[in-house]
Each structure stands twice: as C-alpha cells, then as structure tokens.
Image (tube, coloured by chain):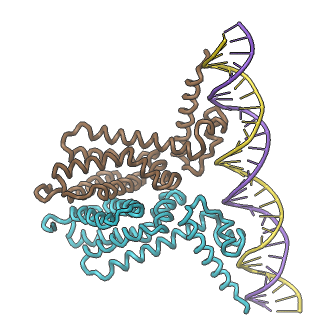
Chain colours: A cyan, B brown, C yellow, D purple
Amino acid sequence: MTVTRVEQRAATRRALLAEGRRRFAADGYHDVVLTDVAQAVGVTKGAAYHHFESKVGLFRAVVAEVQRELGERVADAAEPYDDPWEQLRAGCRTFLAAGCDPTVRRIVLVDAPAVLGWDEWRAMDEDSSARHLSEALDALVKAGAIADQPVEPLARLLSGAMNEAALWLARSANPQALGQTEQALDRLLNGLRSQSNQQP
Amino acid sequence: MTVTRVEQRAATRRALLAEGRRRFAADGYHDVVLTDVAQAVGVTKGAAYHHFESKVGLFRAVVAEVQRELGERVADAAEPYDDPWEQLRAGCRTFLAAGCDPTVRRIVLVDAPAVLGWDEWRAMDEDSSARHLSEALDALVKAGAIADQPVEPLARLLSGAMNEAALWLARSANPQALGQTEQALDRLLNGLRSQSNQQP
DNA sequence: AAGTTCACATACCTTGAGTATGTGAAACGG
DNA sequence: CCGTTTCACATACTCAAGGTATGTGAACTT
C-alpha cells in the first residue's frame, strides 16, 4: 500500500489548502497560526513551508482558489442568458449572494486587500470575477444598450458597490435586505440605459 | 520653563498619533513597529502603551482621526449648496478626491477593515462620512426627487462604489480617470431620479 | 543494489507585541 | 515649604509565532 510521491505531495498540499481556507475564513488571517494548520492536517510547519513559501504564500493560494470559484459561479449564472442585460443582472445577483458566504467575505473582501496589498488583490480580482463585469459592460456599450463611455471607471464603481453591499448583507438580520439591494442595484444600472431604452 | 503634566501628556499623545499616522499610511499596519514609532517621537514603547492600550488601540485612534477629517471635508463641500442633488454630488466628488489621499487610502480603506474588523470599521464609517450619504439620500427621498425606497441598501452600494473607485483612482495614471469616474457616478445617480425628473 | 531526490520532521533563531515594575518630577495637602 | 501621592513615562522581561537551517527516511532512478 505504498503511495507515490506525487500523490502524497498533492494530497498534503490540498489538505493544507483546505485547512487554511477553513481557518482563514473562521478566524481571519492574523489569528491563524501556521503550526496549527499543519498539525490539524497531520504534518508539521516544515511541510507548509515546503509547499508554500510563507504564511502569506498559503493565504495567497487560498485567495486565488476562492476567487476562481467565485468567478466561475458568476460566469455560470450569466451564461444561460442571451440578453446581455440579463447576463449582467444575473451575474450581479449571484455575486451579491456569493459575497455573503463567510469564506468569500472574510478571505477575499476583508483580509486579502490588506494582506496581499491592494494592487495584487485587484489583479486577482480582475482575473476572476471583475473581468466578467467589464466584459458585460463592454458588450452593452457595443450593443448600444448603454451610453458610450469608458468601461473601466464604471466597472470599478459597480464592483465596489457589490463588494460593499455583500459585506453589509452578510451582517444584516433583515430578510428583505437582499431583495432591496437587488432593487437598488437595478435602479442604478437602469440609469446607464440609453435614453430611448429606459424601463420603469 | 516647567511644563504641566496635562500639557506634556497631550503633547506626547498628539506626537504618537501623528507619527503613527505617517507610518501607518506609508508602510501599512503590519509593517509598523510600535517601538520605532515611540522612538521617533522621543519616548519609549512604554509611553505608547500608557496612552493607548495596544498597537491596535493606536491604530484605532488614527483611523478615527482620519475618518473624522474626511467626514468634515465631505460635509463642508456639500454645505454651501441648497439643492440636495447638488449637495449629494459635491459630497461624492469630494469623497472621490479625498479617498485618493494615501493616508485615507491605506489606513481607512485598506487596512482598517482587516485590522479592526468590518463591523467596527463600518460603525466608524457610519459615524463620519457614510452618515452624510444616508442623510442626503434620505432628503432626496423625502423631497420626492428619487423613488421612494429603503435608503440603507442604496447608501451601502454607493458608499462601496466610491470607496473602490477612490482606491482605483489613486493607482490610475490616466489624468482623465477622475472626470470619467465622476461622469459614470452621475449616470448611476441619475438612474435614481423619479421618472418626471430625468436629466440628459 | 547503490546512489539520488525529495517530502517532509526537528531544532533553532529572531522579531515584535505585550507586561510588570521601577522612577523622578509634577501635583497636592497640610 | 515640606512630606506625600500621583502619574507619565522608562527599563527589563516574557512569550508567541514566523521564518530558517539542517537532518532523515522512504520513494525514485540507474
């Protein structure tokens, strides 16, 4: 019952990643101690440093994983629609809901910018979910559905709006809050429509 | 040339606060070492712990100070206008510009949520700048200028939008970015106007 | 079967936050 | 004016945790 090295290596790495993810989400980056993460997985700190160059390195890998999953969920939600407006709305709503997940919330939205620095965080965000937003807006501009304008500032505004709204929603006890936020977001987006194209 | 104790105490506290503010803004919370802050001011770490209960305590005091100044700037910018729409726009524009300040950026927008926790950060934000936003929106709803709706979700969306946009603007080399962001924000806000009230 | 690689374990170092206690000058009471 | 108290710090120490240097045994190679 001997195990190959590549198998073992991959298993350990996955285990460290999973345990780190759990703890980073539950306790926040600062309160997680690497030795404990390793011990919980049945290895020592040395193993963690063999797989990741540092505590930040493990965190970075976790952030990348969570971001990638988030991006996929957003993309999957938008994909079935043909109308770019509906794609945008579906993506936004999925993001709002997903951002309330404690893992996304704590790891990606709260800790990552401070731990990795805003520039790196933004680069990772762009690679995953924020890219979909820019693309959707770009499609709407090209289709003439919204006023011709630079997409980047708009994408940043909307991305930040949804990030913050998700953080807030996760803390809200009001069950209507999600629906109200979606409505408010719809109103804001509606402001972008070309004049001939307004909806009530 | 003997100095009273209250004077001395106040002077030391102010100096620690100022030096901490400089370093937190320049290096980020994690890379600032309390001993160095104290030494730069001509006292030892003991003094810092006498005035603030911890490193986080000093940081919290700095955040509160920066937040308060920011809130005042926003309020001052809005105050001269009578029209609530113009008050909102002026406040938003001032916030966008102020958020690019490295001190606000790093201390308030990047580090504070992770270091103090999102809940405390939000409470402080609400006490200073975000409150003005809610009040402005509330006035617009009551005046019938924008559709009747819960103000809180909308305020969160807009607050997050401007926070993120400010972070992005600070990193943008494009001199037109600020103007483009202001335009995009205007378009979004315009979507809130009551139907009878749309503007080009 | 001998040698090499490598996925870890072990032992150690270092930094920095936090604490416990000391001290001397201002405040205060007589 | 003098003894006492207060307090704004300084000094010396503890401890947790990130990081590093090196050892080791099992898998892989030849």
In the image, residue A159 sits, relative to residue D7, either above or below, namely below
Q: Quadrant of residue B196?
A: bottom left
Q: Give the x, y percent position of residue B56.
A: 56, 47
Residue at coordinates 73% horizontally, 90% vertically from top-left?
A: A2
Front one among B67 and A173: A173
B154 on left or right of A167: left
Name the residue located 24 percent from the left edge and 44 percent from the top edge. Answer: B87
Which one is in front, B141 or B170? B141
The quadrant of the image that shows the N terminus of chain A is: bottom right
Q: In the picture shown, does residue B11 fall above or below A148?
A: above
Q: Quarter of the image holding residue A136? A: bottom left
Give the residue at x 59% y 23%.
B5
List the single residue furthest toward the left.
B196
Residue in the picture at 46% in, 42% down: B64
Task: Give the total of numbered labels.
Answer: 0
For residue B193, side relative to residue A101 (left or right): left
Say which of B42 and B195 sits in front.
Answer: B195
- In the rendered image, which quarter is residue C11 located in? bottom right
Percent of width and height locating residue A16? 62, 73
Residue B197 placement, left or right of A173: left
| Residue A179 at x, y percent in the picture | 29, 67
The percent position of residue B6, horizontal first and vertical second, equals: 56, 25
Image quarter of the C terminus of chain A: bottom left
